[in-house]
Image (tube, rainbow, N blue to C red):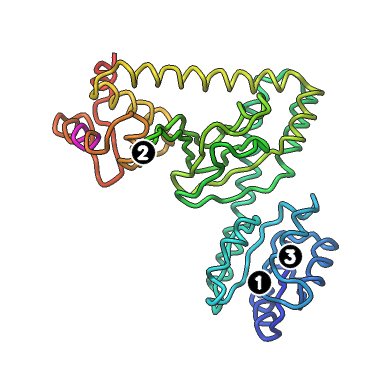
Amino acid sequence: MKKVLVIEDNDDIRENVVEIIELAGYTVYSAQNGKAGVDLALKHLPDIILCDIMMPEMDGYGVLYILNQHPETSTIPFIFLTAKAEHLDLRKGMDLGADDYLTKPFDDMELSQSIESRLKKKERQQKFYSASLDHLGALVKNVDGLAELKNIVHERKTRVFKKNQVVYYDGDKGNGIYLVISGCVKTIKLADDGRELMTGMYLAEDYLGINALLANEAYTDTATAIEDSTLCLIPKDLLEQLLSRHPEVGREFIKLLAKDIREKELQLLQLAYNSVRKKMAEVLLRLQRTKAKDTSGFKISREDLAAMAGMATETVSRTLSDFKDEGLIEKTASLITILDEPRLAKMKN
């Protein structure tokens, strides 16, 4: 039976929440302040935690911070219970690593659905970890090194980045590599005139920041979520220990980095020498290769297309309109579906 911890200083709210959750079949522990909540979390290791923000003894931010310092509690899904007046303070909580929030007053259905969705998401993430690391494991011959990498990832907590939220900035200290669990992240460089050049696009099972890790330098571009995305940060110190003990793992990261460099070199050549139509055809085909297998098209803004192709947004609009008129693509708002891939492929050659 799944265990839920409720930390709430208002007696009426706490008792009501506990009753609802118990009726749903969960084992529930409750605390009336942050300090008692931390003690219960460390003692019982619940599957999920619901916590108020403003409380005596210790507020919700303090609870989340302390639990993140303990490996056994750092990966537990954490949901803030917040009053509407505290809504503007939620970003602080999300930056600390909270997974979600419920705004008071909430009804029984909202509460139950929030708990269920977070628990299911954690189960899916655990399955994804195994699949993505097994993919790397097919390349890594040292079983001990792979097992250690798996343990490092399993012990880390994921973080949700909302659409257009920055993961890291150009010049930030490289503090590890990010594994994309779900969603899509772009990396960009800014020109002197303020224009963006998109240097990469990363989907589920891709790693960001390998070059900064291996070169022991700051990040050299800015990473931003194109859509709501879930990422896992694998800390630099843990990876360095792993790579020193198991060079085979390091060699595979170097291969991933080399592939990324080759793609960037090809992109620069295309930006320098290709015509507008060739550039757009190449970008669309690249996006087609990286889209989810169970979807017919992909979503991308004019601005991101312009950054990828090195064009003005007006040029992007005209070129897409031409492609649509020629029956090469279908476009509805930001959703693009390729209708004639062979003709686009022939155009870029």
In the rendered structure, which segment of residues is drawn in magenta? 316-320
Secondary structure type for disc 2: helix
Q: Main secondary structure of the magenta part?
A: helix
Closer to the chain start, of discs 3 and 2, is 3
Q: Position of residue 212 (x, y in %)?
A: 62, 29
Q: Residue at x 67, y 86 (%)?
A: 12
Check disc 3 and report the residue beneath it.
Answer: 62
Query: Which amino acid type corresponds to the residue marked 1 in the rendered image?
Result: Ile
Residue 77 shows which numbered tag?
A: none
Determine the residue located farthest toward the front in the rendered image: 192
Marks 3 and 2, how far apart in space? 38 Å
Query: Considering the image in quadrants, where does the N terminus appear?
Result: bottom right
Q: Position of residue 346 (x, y in %)?
A: 26, 16
User: What is the quadrant of residue 115 in the picture?
Assistant: bottom right
Query: Considering the image in quadrants, where does the C terminus appear?
Result: top left
In the displayed structure image, the side of residue 73 where residue 259 appears, left or right: left
Residue 53 shows which numbered tag?
A: 1
Q: Residue at x 64, y 71 (%)?
A: 24
Residue 304 shows which numbered tag?
A: 2
Marks 3 and 1, how far apart in space? 9 Å
Secondary structure type for disc 3: helix
Q: Is residue 319 highlighted in magenta?
A: yes
Crowding at mark 2 (Cα within 10 Å: few <14, some 14-19, many 20+): some
Q: Is residue 130 visible?
A: no
Marks 1 and 2, how far apart in space? 37 Å
Q: Position of residue 276 (x, y in %)?
A: 24, 24
Closer to the chain start, of discs 3 and 1, is 1
Residue nearer the viewer, 166 or 230: 166
Q: How many marks?
A: 3
Determine the residue located farthest toward the top in the rendered image: 349
Determine the residue located farthest toward the left in the rendered image: 325
Q: Is residue 40 highlighted in magenta?
A: no
